[in-house]
Image (cartoon, helix red, strand yellow):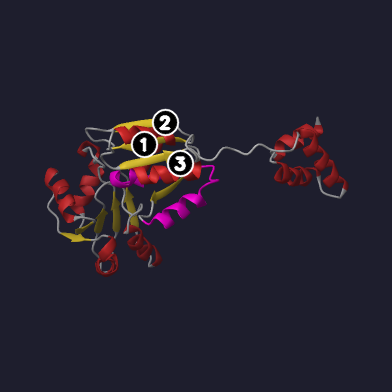
Amino acid sequence: MSGKLYLVGTPIGNLGDFSPRAIETLESADFIAAEDTRVTLKLLNHFDIRKPMVSYFEHNKYASGAKIFARIEAGETCALVTDAGMPAISDPGEDIVRMCAENGIEVVTVPGPSALISAIALSGLPTQRFCFEGFLSTSNKSRREHLESLKNERRTMIFYEAPHKLMRTLEDMKNTFGGERKISLCRELTKLHEETIRTDIQGAIRHFTEIPPKGEFVLVIDGAPEEESSFSVDDALALVEKYRSEGLSHKAACKKAAAETGFKANELYDASIN
């Protein structure tokens, strides 16, 4: 009988955020797979948890992942943790989850702190729709290509960044999105020196030119503004009538005209009736 894989969220700074259920899960697991066993050992010692650990990170994920999966398949229960936050998010844990899912092995989540969710909640920017882009490449060319692909992205965007790469990333963002694009920079979330700076990209560059960046950052950037339609309402309604005369239903004509003009189909439907 197969075991289970538990995805256990760990604190991103403040140990008080570790949930009772997470503690119980680590205590009951047969073994713990950790991104850095030294970091996880500090967590386990704090909560007086004694469990065997195996190392599982980006550079050993293929060899170690196969061994971890084999133990789960043989009936053991594994608790997967990362150094901070939820495993399998911008993390090699996604590979083990995929292996378990493809082989019918149960995967259970024990939710915990998440830097990206915390940062967008703090940002003051739109939260209804957003996309997580993780870490940008250290390669100048790849980083710029990545940003260029997001130039017209209208959803709020979230990035992780290290302090020594922040200024270079902000300069590339300025060149791609423009200096006036709104940005929220969260650093050291839940830690002693937690800080959130809400400004625009040019303002962020000025700030960190004067004050060297310290700590890990989550960058939350406003999406591209909605493009104004070059069509008037009358133009759109004229298209509705044109498509109706060609045999389309009222609803279909409004939908087709909306796609071409940027208006909403229900707005054109109501306007054409009135």
Choose the circle earlier in sequence order: 3 or 2.
Answer: 3
Amino acid type indicated by mark 2: Thr
**Relative to 265, does residue 137 appear above or below in the rendering?**
below
Q: Is residue 157 visible?
A: no
Span shown in magenta: 139-166
- Residue at 15% from the left image edge and 53% from the top image edge: 38
Locate residue 175 relative to residue 80 in the image: left or right: right
- State the separation of the CA atoms marked 1 and 2: 8 Å
Inspect the magenta stretch and tell me whether residue 153 lies in it: yes
Q: Secondary structure at mark 2?
A: strand
Locate residue 269 relative to residue 35 in the image: left or right: right
Reading the image, the residue beneath label 2 is 199
Q: Which mark is residue 185?
A: 1
Give x and y (percent) for residue 213.
28, 38
Q: Mark 1 and mark 3 in contact? Answer it, CB < 8 Å.
A: no
Q: Quadrant of residue 30?
A: bottom left
Amino acid type indicated by mark 1: Leu
Q: Nearer the viewer, mark 3 or mark 2?
A: 3
Give x and y (percent) for residue 72.
27, 65
Choose the circle earlier in sequence order: 1 or 3.
Answer: 3
Q: Which mark is residue 143?
A: none
Q: Which mark is residue 174?
A: 3
- Residue at 72% from the left image edge and 42% from the top image edge: 261
**Relative to 50, does residue 14 appear above or below in the rendering?**
above
Choose the circle earlier in sequence order: 1 or 2.
Answer: 1
